[in-house]
Image: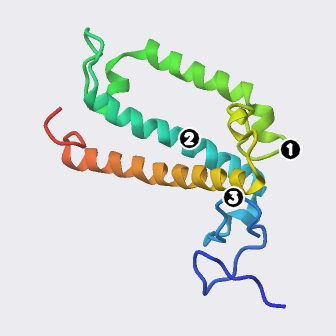
Amino acid sequence: MLAAKSKAIPFLDAPAKLDGTLAGDYGFDPMGISEMQDINMLRTFELKQGRVAQLAAAGFLFQEILPHIPGPGYDERNPLLASASVGLAPNIQILLAAGCVELATAASTYGDGEPGNLGWGTKMLEGKTEAQIKEMKVKEIKHCRLAMVAVMGMIAQTLKTGAPLLGGEF
């Protein structure tokens, strides 16, 4: 019996766990990570990191463009230096807030159930067909993957040029 071929790289066999049941699954896993871990946990992590990357991409631009709170340490326009300029207390608040979200969603993240479903925003799926829901999930994972690549590009460009993404000076 022949193994199914990857949609992403047609001359390679698709990993066994990547059978197309997850939204956005194109059989791409050249390092074989899906064979080492639970696929639902990996998808949950991918969605979580992608959602954070979407926020980071927007935050990167907002830090450079939008007006800032007046005061020492709050006027840094370089997103890579901003967290260091505000001091320890605001950074601890951010860390604690992220920790609270992690604790509140731990059962959804590490338990059984649908990967990435934290129970937030599910009303947007009410009244939709299974095909429409799958299409929305594919769009979400594609946006997540694009955001992860985009944030890395933003960081690389800022480090390389030392200038804002949209031009000018910090």
Q: Mark 3 points at which residue?
A: 23
Identity, as a three-letter code, of the amino acid under mark 1? Asp
Cα separation between marks 3 and 1: 17 Å
Give the SS element for disc 2. Answer: helix
User: Vertical placement of 84 versus 157: above or below?
Assistant: above
Looking at marks 3 and 1 on the same chain, the residue that comes earlier in the sequence is marked by 3
Q: Mark 1 points at which residue?
A: 112
Q: Where is residue 89 in the image (x, y as percent from the top left)?
A: 45, 12
Q: Residue 63 falls in which quadrant of the image?
A: top left
Give the SS element for disc 1. Answer: loop
Please tell me which residue lies in front, 92 or 18.
Answer: 18
Location of the C terminus by quadrant is top left
Q: Which residue is drawn at 48% across and 50% down?
A: 148
Identity, as a three-letter code, of the amino acid under mark 2? Arg
User: How many numbered callouts?
Assistant: 3
Looking at marks 2 and 3 on the same chain, the residue that comes earlier in the sequence is marked by 3
Label number found at residue 51:
2
Looking at marks 2 and 1 on the same chain, the residue that comes earlier in the sequence is marked by 2
Cα separation between marks 2 and 3: 16 Å
Identity, as a three-letter code, of the amino acid under mark 3? Ala
User: Vertical placement of 31 versus 93: above or below?
Assistant: below
Q: Residue at x 43, y 16 (%)?
A: 88
User: Vertical placement of 32 versus 139: above or below?
Assistant: below
Please tell me which residue lies in front, 32 or 27.
Answer: 27
Cα separation between marks 2 and 1: 20 Å
Location of the N terminus by quadrant is bottom right
Question: In the rendered view, does 93 fall on the left or right side of 84?
Answer: right
